[in-house]
Amino acid sequence: MLRDITIGQYYPAESVIHKLDPRTKILGSFMMIIALFVITPLWGYLIPFGTLALVILLSKVPLKFILKGLKPILFFMIFAVSINVFFTPGKVIFSYGFIEITMEGLERALMTLSRFVFLIITSSMVTLTTSPMALTDGIEKLLNPLKVIKFPAHELAMMMTIALRFIPTLIEEADKIMKAQTARGADFETGNIFNRAKNMIPLLVPLFISAFRRADELAMAMEARCYRGGVGRTRMKQLRFNHKDVFALVFSVLYCISIMIAL
């Protein structure tokens, strides 16, 4: 389950999406996420489905690898769908005792499920197709206008990228600790939810210690390299928009505007 989390991971490939400017991918993903919450009719989700399918096809990231990232939130999706199905008033289409399923509940449940899935996949596509350094530079460039009001754009971008980059690292560490604890007789699979939560304590304590140790090592490495924030820093690779980025941005804006107007 831990290895199924794909947010924060980078999947290297030679594709059109990988070669886009990170700012284009960040802004494009925001446009797609905004459009998700504007759509009201259920059939309207066919549009983001087709758009996202095209992006996945162009990115050359395996669909199986992308869908694997939905497993960790499967419980939350089932819970959200169940709440909408059984507790939304409307036209009853099925009734058994105190259980009632309405047409409005089914529609709202499908909308909630679609939003969950598209939101996770859209967010994952940004990190899967963008290296950590490029993502840092992209976020910093987008936040640069806020430097006028003394906003620490570089520091915030660095913290966000380090946090995303540490997700797969900590997942790998947790998997190693879990296997070591299992070899010593720990049981993380059987029992009810309360017993499983209690059995996670031997995993969480060493994981927190490992996270603090890695953070301390990273701080010492950055200090040894005389890191002092974004003041006076230069980059070997400068971010530049090309015609593909312009086309992608125009497409994203038109996509968002057309959905707002039509739906």
Image (spheres, helix red, strand yellow):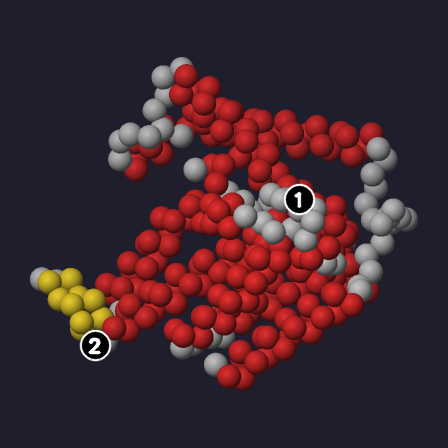
Residue 249, image quadrant: bottom right
- Above or below for 186 versus 196: above
Tell me the amino acid under the disc marked 1: Pro
Tell me the amino acid under the disc marked 2: Lys
Crowding at label 1, few (<14), some or many (≥20) Cα neighbours within 10 Å? Answer: some
Residue with the mark numbered 1: 12
Q: Nearer the viewer, residue 208 or 45?
A: 45
Residue at position x 23%, y 76% in the image: 90
Query: Is 132 left or right of 35, judged from the image as shown?
Result: right
Residue at position x 45%, y 70% in the image: 45
Q: CA distance from mark 2 to mark 1?
A: 49 Å
Residue 114, image quadrant: bottom left
Crowding at label 2, few (<14), some or many (≥20) Cα neighbours within 10 Å? Answer: few
Q: Is residue 6 visible?
A: yes
The picture places residue 194, in percent across and down from the top left corner, at 30, 35
Q: Which residue reaches farthest top?
A: 184
Residue 122, image quadrant: bottom right
Query: Is 72 left or right of 8, judged from the image as shown?
Result: left
- Quadrant for the N terminus, please: top left
The picture places residue 131, in percent across and down from the top left corner, at 70, 46
Instruction: Tell me the mark number nearer the camera, choosing from 2 and 1.
Output: 1
The picture places residue 197, in percent across and down from the top left corner, at 36, 34
Query: Is 86 left or right of 164, judged from the image as shown?
Result: left
Residue at position x 45%, y 58% in the image: 117
